[in-house]
Amino acid sequence: METLQGKKSFDIDINEFTLRHKNYNRLILDLGTGDGKFAFHLADNFPNHFVIGLDSCRENLHQYSRANLPNLIYIIANAQSLPRELNGLISYIHINFPWGSLLGSLLNGDTNLFCGLEKISSPQALINLNLNAGALNEQGWSLLHGVDQVEVNLRRFGWQIENPKQINIQALKKFPSTWSKRIAVGRDPRAISLSGCFNP
Ligand SMILES: C[S@@+](CC[C@H](N)C(=O)[O-])C[C@H]1O[C@@H](n2cnc3c(N)ncnc32)[C@H](O)[C@@H]1O
């Protein structure tokens, strides 16, 4: 699979990847990591966890992927075709403020995405999604209907989801991701989080 450090990309195989993460008890995935700030924050604050930031777009990742933390890696891949090196390993999936085809797949129940999430998850894996009104509107959904649709799809694919929670502006400002802060000061700062656990 392709990994990124600064502007350089490296292919690493399963043996090299295993060497990188084998001493950590939890692997956390930030799917659609954007510039990678949230993944960096997790790795920096939880040195016992191995954190993977994954995005299909490399251009925004140059700054945070330069960070030399032993427990952090950035992978370039599509959410609909997750690297098989991750299979069975991920204990926590974060999806923060998705847009584009990632959000589209969450909304239309894309089996490539949801079966991939199932494959990479360890037993009882946890998931947290933060969804915002602007991104959902761009795909033709209101905030409430969009969140409801994503929740239905998650449940269909074996995720047990708790009641959705509103994320207020203060919480958006405090949340350690770049898009969260943009949304907080934007025209439509409404956002909702969904969380749950894999229990097919
Ligand atoms: C609005 S940004 C949010 C970035 C970051 N999570 C944050 O909170 O700052 C959405 C990200 O999803 C990524 N994305 C969209 N479709 C994707 C896909 N199919 N596979 C992987 N990443 C995708 C985009 O490249 C973009 O970086």
Image (cartoon, rainbow, N blue to C red):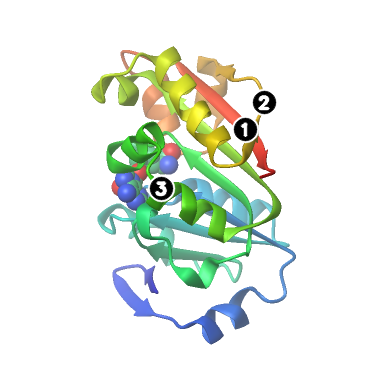
Mark-to-mark CA distance, 3 and 2: 22 Å
155 with respect to 148 (left or right): right
> What quarter of the picture does the C terminus occupy?
top right
* 168 over 41 or under it: above or below: above
Residue located 51% across and 24% down the image:
172
Callout in the foreground (1, 3): 3
Disc on the earlier residue, 1 or 3: 3
* 132 over 85 or under it: above or below: above
196 with respect to 150 (left or right): right
Label for residue 195? 1
Taking the image as drawn, is residue 32 in sight? Answer: no
Callout in the foreground (3, 2): 3
Q: Provide residue 60's location: percent of width, then percent of height.
A: 30, 52
Residue located 68% across and 76% down the image:
22
Classify mark 2: residues with Cα within 10 Å, few (<14), some (14-19) or many (20+): few
Disc on the earlier residue, 3 or 2: 3
Query: 185 or 76, which is in the foreground?
Result: 76
**Secondary structure category for the residue under label 3:** helix
Mark-to-mark CA distance, 1 and 3: 20 Å
Check disc 2 and report the residue beneath it: 162
Q: To which quarter of the image does residue 65 belong?
A: bottom left
Classify mark 3: residues with Cα within 10 Å, few (<14), some (14-19) or many (20+): some
- Name the residue type under label 1: Ser
- Name the residue type under label 3: Thr
Query: 162 or 157, which is in the foreground?
Result: 157
* 91 over 25 or under it: above or below: above
Check disc 3 and report the residue beneath it: 111
- Name the residue type under label 2: Glu
Q: Provide residue 102's location: percent of width, then percent of height.
A: 35, 42
Taking the image as drawn, is residue 60 in sight? Answer: yes
